[in-house]
Image (cartoon, rainbow, N blue to C red):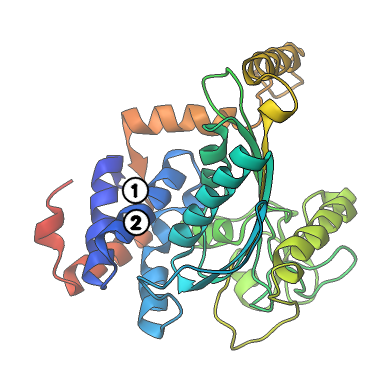
């Protein structure tokens, strides 16, 4: 697999999107979010999606430069219509609105509908952390294509329905819980397929509901399982509630419309720590809490206990130094795009 500096991958993504008619400032935002996903080890949400996003632009499923419309607003809430713009762009702007409202009023809650894929959720609560806010974001595709079987079922009825919570602290890396409520994000199945690798048992079932390790079975009518293995009812319950926040509360609805374009409905909430406790005191105690949890002697097969978000922080430090690995098939698709869009010379050599 080729290895690239993050700056080079950012330039690749940026030039491709600009060539597809994306405004420069939006191309910058999208490229930054995708490369950040690769940096922290979430390759399933990184540059692997460049060809897919370009295809969605061609179909009109992503509308570069789409207007950001506030349909309803109060001092603490807002309803946003993204008009099928890039999810990264729309949700980043919505998050900034949530930050402003929470800093002014103490709390804020915003819903977003009609936008494309927002990528890795962790980027948005991280914006809030930097402003002294605790934040939560959930995402769901409404009536769009489904990926996950409910606990006790075998057919797809739910999205991967991720949830992310970020908390300010004095730790060097952000305290960040960023997880799908399914056993795995759908992008990781695609990643395994592109890398021609099996997936762990417990991730997916085939079309007959039988456990499988072949990632190709997912595309042949299989389904992803809820997080939790034999306790999957817990992941299913979380997924059900994420869909309520991001599908029903946003007005996107539920169900399966085979013709529906991908749409990330989003619920964002933010809380000003200073309205509850002095911020610096809270951040200090969060650091001490994480350090206390890490004092637990490691179990068999582990070298240490990590706080939520620590692995991603360490991965980013490592990849900024050593580079980002991109699987051959993904890179082939990207280089073909660069050639077809005549941006290879602009991008230059790695």
CB of mark 1 within 8 Å of CB of mark 2? yes
Looking at the image, residue 180 lies above or below residue 40: below
Q: Nearer the viewer, residue 285 or 6?
A: 285
Residue 309, quarter of picture: top right
Location of residue 4 with respect to 311 vertically, above or below: below
Dividing the image into 4 quarters, which one contains the C terminus? Answer: top left
Q: Is residue 336 visible?
A: no
Question: Of the numbered discs in the image, which one, if any, rests on residue 270?
Answer: none
Give the farthest residue toward the left.
345
Residue located 38% across and 57% down the image: 30
Residue linked to disc 2 = 328
The first of marks 1 and 2 along the sequence is: 1
Q: Mark 1 points at which residue?
A: 1
Name the residue at 37% across, 63% down. 50
Is 88 placed left or right of 144 in the picture?
left
Task: Locate residue 10 relative to residue 325 in the image: left or right.
Answer: left
Which quadrant of the figure has residue 21?
Answer: bottom left
Identify which residue is drawn at 19% across, 72% down.
341
Question: Horizontal placement of 162 versus 314: left or right?
Answer: right
On screen, residue 59 above or below 342: below
Q: Position of residue 328 (x, y in %)?
A: 34, 56
User: Does residue 13 lie above or below 71 as drawn?
Assistant: above
């Amino acid at each position: 697999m080729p290895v690239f500096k993050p700056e080079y991958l950012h330039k690749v993504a940026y030039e491709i999107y600009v060539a597809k008619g994306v405004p420069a400032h939006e191309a910058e935002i999208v490229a930054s979010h995708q490369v950040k996903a690769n940096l922290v080890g979430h390759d399933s949400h990184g540059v692997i999606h460049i060809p897919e996003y370009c295809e969605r632009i061609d179909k009109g499923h992503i509308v570069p430069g789409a207007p950001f419309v506030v349909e309803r607003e109060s001092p603490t809430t807002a309803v946003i219509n993204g008009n099928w713009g890039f999810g990264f762009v729309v949700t980043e702007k919505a998050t900034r609105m949530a930050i402003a409202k929470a800093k002014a009023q103490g709390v804020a809650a915003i819903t977003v509908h009609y936008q494309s894929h927002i990528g890795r959720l962790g980027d948005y609560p991280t914006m809030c952390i930097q402003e002294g806010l605790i934040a939560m974001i959930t995402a769901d595709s409404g009536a769009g294509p489904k990926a996950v079987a409910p606990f006790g079922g075998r057919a797809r009825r739910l999205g991967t329905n991720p949830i992310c919570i970020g908390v300010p602290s004095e730790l060097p890396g952000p305290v960040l819980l960023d997880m799908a409520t399914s056993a795995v994000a759908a992008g990781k199945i695609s990643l395994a397929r592109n890398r021609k690798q099996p997936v762990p048992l417990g991730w997916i079932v085939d079309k007959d509901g039988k456990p499988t390790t072949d990632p190709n079975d997912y595309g042949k009518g299989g389904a992803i399982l809820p997080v939790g293995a034999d306790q999957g009812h817990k992941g299913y319950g979380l997924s059900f509630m994420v869909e309520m926040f991001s599908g029903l509360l946003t007005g996107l609805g539920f169900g399966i419309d085979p013709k529906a374009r991908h749409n990330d409905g989003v619920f964002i909430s933010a809380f000003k720590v200073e309205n509850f406790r002095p911020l610096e005191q809270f951040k200090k105690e969060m650091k001490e809490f994480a350090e206390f949890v890490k004092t637990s002697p490691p179990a068999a097969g582990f070298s240490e206990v990590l706080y939520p978000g620590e692995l991603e922080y360490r991965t980013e430090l490592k990849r900024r130094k050593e580079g980002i690995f991109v699987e051959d098939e993904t890179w082939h698709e990207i280089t073909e795009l660069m050639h077809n869009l005549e941006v290879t010379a602009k991008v230059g050599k790695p």
